[in-house]
Amino acid sequence: MNAKRFLCLFLILALLLAACEDKPGPTVSATAEPAGPTAEAEALRHLTILYTNDEHGWMEPTDETGGAAGLMGLWREEEGYTEDGPFLILSGGDMWTGPAISTWFDGESMAEVMNAMGYDAAAIGNHEFDFGLGGLAERATQAEFPFLSANIRDKGTGDVADVALPYVVQEVNEVQVGLIGLTTVETPHTTRPDNVADFDFIAYQEALAEVVPQAKADGAALLVVIGHICGNEMRTLAPRAAELGIAVIGGGHCHERVSSVVDGVALVEAGGFMQAYAKVELIFDTASGAVVSIEPSTHSNQASPEQADPEIAAVISQWRAETDAALSQVIGYTQTGIDRGSDEMFNMVTDAWLKAYPAADVALTNTGGFRQAIPAGEITLGTIVGVLPFDNVLIDVELTGEQLRENLQCCHPVVAGMTTVGGYTMADGTPLDAAATYHVLVNDFMYAGGDDFKLKVYDPDAYDTAIDWRQPVIDWIMSLDTSPEDPLDEHLDPVAR
């Protein structure tokens, strides 16, 4: 037998022996395609996250943006959204405090709109506490999606507070997605402190280190954080999130637009007021449990009226009718409108307080309490509710001149009854006396310690006037009987104080 023939017989024998070995392996039918590429492809799942934050009740369209109905229309037309498709609709929190169409109804209208839009989950933002714990509980009961926060803890027990769930696991396109919530640690200073007095807001990394293993134990394969946290906080958190296997962090609170990838973690935030949305397109490998592709982006909500989703538009129209019925009374007229952060706006509000309560020497308010401008034309009750949407009352606090100076320097409030330009001078021209006692009118958010004001510490028994902080403004505007011939603009004080 020659060498060539011997080699052929040896190879045949080797192949026969290999075929007879009892070893595990995939079973392939005679008609099947090769298993490798198909198995790999079948393990891949595509998911799309559509994300908003800081909606603040801005459900209606404006001249520049399409509102909630326009946004829903864009998602259907541009993103191919369907209710049973591979989509998650998420909110980064601060859902309802804003225009009268939401604020007047303690957010009930906005919750109904978000239900109709199919939101899957939302983080709790600081302004979710604006209507008290009872108001938050009502919205949580109404909402058809969970409210999430892993870092709100009960001061007594250290457990996750019962105002929210720390996380949920939802199936999307056969992927178990763990959604984890975070709430800004600034909450005690950016909502009424009394409403959150029983809670601690622990560090984000600490909360995630505790909750991520729990979510994984409950079957979560893909982890997404919905955070009411700012862009710099997301970027700081990203390396630790990557170590924990988190794929996406959504933000809020600072009204930024963010779309980036840091350490493999997608970071997104969509500005606010439903003027835009963020999107994360990702492909998840169910075999390896890894994200193989991730792409974040942000998109403006420039939907035309023709693109508006009719179902969402109908819900908003119903609430507009209810708002108009409650708040449609015309109280004044402005020729040019009043900008939100203008001296005219600031002086109008605080001067009105002093007119309504002349026992006070000074009025202070925080700039964050002003939430929108007054547009040109007729001014209604609803307009003022939109400007000052929080349910605050006025408190008469007794402060020494030195204590007043401290609060002016630390927190830079809007001022009436004195000036801070070129020194601290009272309205009658006398300098602020450090040892004298002054009656200072503030809103109860500030009195409770909001925005770091130190008022309750100095006067723990301050007098609650029970005056709704909007009412003096409404009364003053009505007293002027303004019209196109005599607009409110002619009565405003433009002087910075």
Image: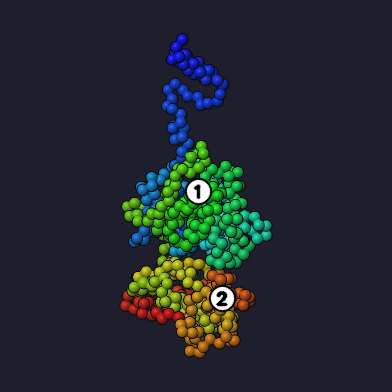
Residue at 34 percent across and 60 percent down: it is 64
- The 10 Å Cα crowd at callout 2, few under 14, some 14 to 19, many 20 or more, is many
Q: Is residue 165 above or below residue 333?
A: above
Residue at 54 percent across and 43 percent down: it is 221
Residue at 46 percent across and 40 percent down: it is 45
How far separated are the C-alphas under marks 2 and 1? 47 Å
Residue 180, x across and y down, in percent: 55, 51
Give the total number of marks visible in the rendering: 2
State which tag comes first along the sequence, 2 or 1: 1
Residue under label 1: 247
Residue at 44 percent across and 57 percent down: it is 258
Residue lying furthest front = 2
Q: What residue type is labelled 2?
A: Ile
Q: In this view, does 412 lie above or below 99?
A: below
* 206 vs 470, nearest the viewer: 206
- The 10 Å Cα crowd at callout 1, few under 14, some 14 to 19, many 20 or more, is many
Q: Which amino acid does label 1 sit on?
A: Ala
Q: Can residue 65 be seen in this view?
A: yes
Q: At numbered mark 2, what does the secondary structure look like: helix, strand or loop? A: strand
Residue 493, x across and y down, in percent: 40, 80
Residue 267, x across and y down, in percent: 47, 54
Q: Is residue 118 visible?
A: no
* 203 vs 9, nearest the viewer: 9
**373 relative to 187 in the view: left or right:** left
**326 relative to 192 in the view: left or right:** left
Q: At numbered mark 1, what does the secondary structure look like: helix, strand or loop? A: strand
Q: Quadrant of residue 327?
A: bottom left
Q: In which quarter of the image is residue 438?
A: bottom right
Residue under label 2: 395
Residue lying furthest top = 1
Residue lying furthest right = 156
For the C terminus, the quadrant is: bottom left
